[in-house]
Amino acid sequence: MAIPALIVRSSDRNLAFQSRMLTAWAILMLASAGGLEVRQALADDATRSATHAQERLIKVVNGNSRDKLTTFAVDRQGRIIAGVTGEKSLLRIFNSEGDQLAEWPLPVPPEAVNVGPKGDVYVGGAGKLLLLDSAGAVTKVCEAPNLAGAKDAAVVIQKKVQERAQLDVAAKQQDQIRTSTKRLADLAKKIAIIDRELKAIADEASTGPDFDAKEEDQREQERKGLLKKRAALVRLGKNLKTTIAATTGNRGNASGQGPAAATEPQPPSIDQLVAVQARIASISASTKDVFFACSSSTGSGFDVWRTDLDFEQGRKIGESLSGCCGQMDVQANDNGVYVAENTKRRVSCYTRDGKSVLDFGSRERGSDASFEGCCNPMNVAFGPGRSVYTAEAGSGRVKRFSADGTFMELVGAVELVPGCKKVSIAVSPKGDRVYMLDITRGHIVVMASSEMPPSAAVSSPQTDSLTSLDAGR
């Protein structure tokens, strides 16, 4: 591309000025015609710095069927265990190349799945916790312990919803009264102006020898127009007074009584609120405990529960954790309970009793450890060398951190349909493959690496004896 003539022909101008012009021209060209190449070069650099690249897709459900991919995990043999709902509830089993090996039927729709340190498969869904052996046989089914008090919690939540709705109705009514009163005052001012104009016309009326028929006719037409306008304003004022009176009289109906309340949206039923609490957002296990996240009994956010390996001794260890887009990923191993607190753009680590011991991540744009977008990281997983992997919705980025939260490397980025959603990840036993859920298109994305990840062993925030678990949800 030629250099602008303005520059090459300005030999009589200051050389410093010409230098600045050349620099500005170069920047302009990069930002316009060359901008695409620059952005592509930056993207290529980012790709080269990643340890993994997208290799293939594993199609779990047929786009023409009613089946829906909801969750997945990877076991110690490297098999992919994918949860499917639709006409039937089941787990579909694939090898690492994407070949389907088996189908395991389930008594409940799988909302979360994971693999324990001994190879057992844990499933959560519709208020049930399931344990399967490595061959897919269901060995235990229990009601999630949070449902024991779900009905009582639903009553409290429903009352809160009703109270909030009543406050909203009262606020709307008050705003309507305030607006109508202001408009009524404005109308009164306009009517007063018209009355003054009418009086002026009457005072100007000519009689006797000064009578001018043409001028009087014009005044009469003006007077009729003002009277018509005044009558319209008076009618509008009456309507506003009626509205104010009706709204004032109905303010008591915000308590849920009377005809006005019948037009307001009704709160969710108790059964609906119990069903919400029955949803299992994630499940995982350490060598001693099972942990799962569910909709909170407070009606806001998510609660985290712990049970023993037989789903007994249920105890709530975390309450009202904030999760965007209905997502709350909680993954546990013997190092602690790692939570993807996506609304805070961080990963937090807790003890088995719910005590906070660590958090990492950043909102700072451009930082290696930053999580960008409205709500990331969305999901977490464990990998070789005690490491923690994070997944971001929207960008499809996967990062790897040490157990103490030190950034290690960018694993890669997959092609996803943009949006705030569940992007579960799992890591193969050797770390040579990383998988991500593409819930929109019903497949699992496979990222592969030709090199083994370096060790991420560090001092644990809870204990130096760590156990790497298979990842998923």
Image (cartoon, rainbow, N blue to C red):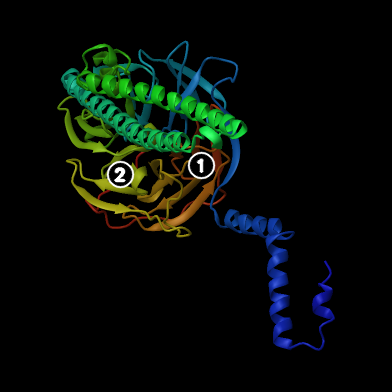
| Residue 466, above or below 255 | below
The span from disc 1 to disc 2 (Cα, nearest Å) is 31 Å
Labels 1 & 2 near each other (Cβ < 8 A)? no
Task: Please tell me which residue is depicted at 30% across the width and 44% down the height of the picture.
Answer: 467
The quadrant of the picture occupied by the N terminus is bottom right
Q: Position of residue 117 (x, y in %)?
A: 32, 35
Q: Residue 114 at what x, y percent from top left?
A: 36, 31
Amino acid marked by disc 2: Thr
Q: Residues within 10 Å of mark 2 (few under 14, many from 20)?
A: some
Residue 311 visible, this orientation: no
Q: Element at badge 2?
A: loop
**Residue nearer the viewer, 33 or 435:** 33
Q: Quadrant of the C terminus?
A: top left
Where is residue 139? Give x, y as percent: 29, 17
Q: Is residue 32 above or below residue 100?
A: below
Secondary structure beneath dot 1 equals: loop
> Is 77 placed left or right of 28 in the picture?
left
Q: Residue at x 37, y 27 (%)?
A: 112
* Residue underneath mark 1: 394
User: Front-most of 195 and 347?
Assistant: 195
The vertical placement of 143 against 330, above or below, is: above
Q: Is residue 63 left or right of residue 275?
A: right
Q: Is residue 448 left or right of residue 9?
A: left
Residue type at tag 1: Gly
Q: Which is more N-terminal, label 2 or label 1? A: 1
Say which residue label 2 marks.
467
Examine the image and state in which quarter residue 254 appears: top left
